[in-house]
Image (tube, helix red, strand yellow):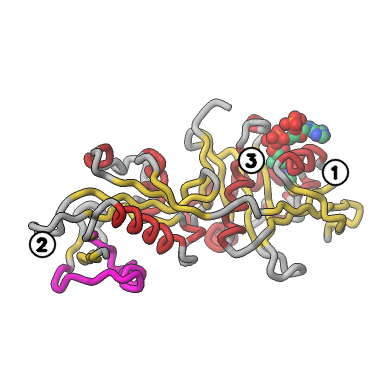
Amino acid sequence: MSGDLRVRPGRPEDVEALKVIRLEALGDTPDAFGDTLETVEHWSDEQWREKARLWNYYLAEVDGSVVGMASGASNDSRPGTCWLFAMYVTPAQRGSGAARALVERVSTWALVSGADALYLYVARAVPRARAFYAKAGFVPTGTTVTMHRDESLVLDEMRRDLGALSFHVEPVSPEALYDLRRRVLRRNDPSAEVTNPGDTLETTRHYGGLVGDQVVVSATFLAGPAPFDPDVAAYQLRYMATDFDLQGRGLGARTLRGALDDLASRGVTRVWANARVSALDFYVIEGWEIVPDSFFVSAESGVDHVVIHRDLP
Ligand SMILES: CC(C)(COP(=O)(O)OP(=O)(O)OC[C@H]1O[C@@H](n2cnc3c(N)ncnc32)[C@H](O)[C@@H]1OP(=O)(O)O)[C@@H](O)C(=O)NCCC(=O)NCCS
């Protein structure tokens, strides 16, 4: 495949991109989907905005252009299970690996949601999709259903076991974290500066929270004393970010704990950070302390901050 492929959770502001790729999908392969182009092409702008806001969907991009999508969702008829829906890759990118990257990202969402498997329905009318799913590790369960809108369309249920996947924390290169820094911390602004002069220093430690080879949490520690105690050697935490669809599920805390264990084993005794006020609870629960009277507004991001620290055993 040529070009730089990435898969990311869609955001409310991606509404136009979602509309374009979803309408393309419904027009290209009508038998693959429960929705029809005839219905969806008449949606109002407000309906699309609501979809972009509420749907757990993912976009595949090559060099920044959207080439595919998928969604991860529950299924009312199968409580407690996680499902892959709305899978589509534009014809020019089929066979490129974009579809596989979408499956891996939705599998990560399912795993982090507590599922041990990812399910899907595939129409018998789309043999290429079925061949692809088999290649990606999905196995038919033997259950079949028919499409609500057209009983003649038979769908096979397939299941991918997620037992081989796990969340883990490990040191990574700074480059592995730039995409998360930009998307989660800089509003996906393509012109935002996401590198740091300290990124390549020998003393700097970069950690990723990963599922497979996908980095879904970032944390960087730069050597340097805290402003409230300039004589004590310390490390500053920067660029702490968990991907949008996986926030609030303990992955940030697990990444931080893995990072602090590693730093402590290297003799680091204090860490500190300029923490976003909106994320303060997260750090306090993890044992960080707030430095009194340290409130400030960041010139870089315009966001409210306080200084926090934690002394390591
Ligand atoms: C389903 C989809 C996302 C898969 O992505 P992809 O990039 O095409 O997948 P790949 O090319 O990696 O794999 C497809 C496999 O099917 C094979 N294939 C191609 N045409 C086929 C056909 N008519 N019958 C059976 N197998 C076929 C390919 O050779 C390939 O297998 P191989 O790598 O062993 O050669 C993509 O084809 C797509 O968007 N299709 C239209 C929408 C759709 O059907 N969505 C599924 C909704 S459930």
Q: Could you tell me residue 276's position as x and y percent?
A: 28, 63
Q: Which label is found at residue 100?
A: 3
Badge 2 amino acid? Asp
Depth check, front residue: 295 or 125: 295
To which residue does mark 1 refer?
125
- Marks 2 and 1: in contact by CB < 8 Å? no
Q: Residues within 10 Å of mark 2 (few under 14, many from 20)?
A: few
First in sequence, mark 2 or 3: give its number: 3
At 17% from the left and 64% from the top, the residue drawn is 296
Quarter of the image that includes the C terminus: bottom left
Instruction: Specify the segment rendered in magenta.
Output: 271-294
- Tell me the quarter of the picture where residue 270 sits: bottom left
In what quadrant does ligand 1 lie? top right
- Marks 3 and 2: in contact by CB < 8 Å? no
Query: From the viewer's perspective, is 248 left or right of 1?
Result: left
To which residue does mark 2 refer?
229
